[in-house]
Image (cartoon, grey):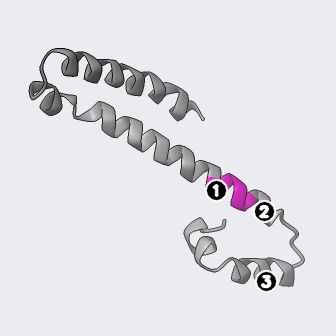
Amino acid sequence: MIDLEQFRRDPEKFRNGAASKGIELDWEKIIDVDSNFRTLQHSVDEASDEAAFPGNQLAKLSGSEKSKFLAELKVAVAKLPELEAR
């Protein structure tokens, strides 16, 4: 198994190690999948953060600000299942 954190720091070490063992891998695909995963994870984290602490922010708002905040919160909560499914 490849430790992706170590791979990100020193990809040549892994490429050389695999080559010395005669193992051929699509390294660019590994990098793309890792990058996509990290991007999606960031999106999930942001959506979770937006949905996690509405009470404190909501108490400080009034009128149209509160309505706008609730609409944005609904969007953030709606995004979570889709992002987590990826």
Stretch of the chain drawn in magenta: 30-35
The amino acid type found where label 1 is placed reads: Asp
The residue lying at 13 percent from left, 25 percent from top is 61
Depicted 32 relative to depicted 53: above or below: below
The residue lying at 78 percent from left, 62 percent from top is 28
Gap between marks 2 and 1, in whole Å? 10 Å
Q: Residues within 10 Å of mark 3 (few under 14, many from 20)?
A: few
- Inspect the magenta stretch and tell me whether residue 54 lies in it: no
Query: 29 or 71, which is in the foreground?
Result: 71
The amino acid type found where label 3 is placed reads: Asn
Residue designated by label 3: 16
Residue designated by label 2: 28
Between disc 1 and disc 3, the foreground one is 1
* Mark 1 vs 3, N-terminal side: 3
Image position, residue 5 (x, y; %): 55, 69
Quadrant where the N terminus is found in the figure? bottom right
The amino acid type found where label 2 is placed reads: Glu
Mark number displayed over residue 34: 1
Left or right for 71, reference 83:
left
Which secondary structure type mostly characterizes the magenta part of the structure?
helix
Secondary structure under the numbered disc 1 in the rendered image: helix
Q: Residues within 10 Å of mark 1 (few under 14, many from 20)?
A: some
Secondary structure under the numbered disc 2 in the rendered image: helix
Depicted 18 relative to depicted 72: above or below: below
The residue lying at 56 percent from left, 49 percent from top is 39
- Inspect the magenta stretch and tell me whether residue 32 lies in it: yes
Q: Quadrant of residue 3?
A: bottom right
Quadrant where the C terminus is found in the figure? top right
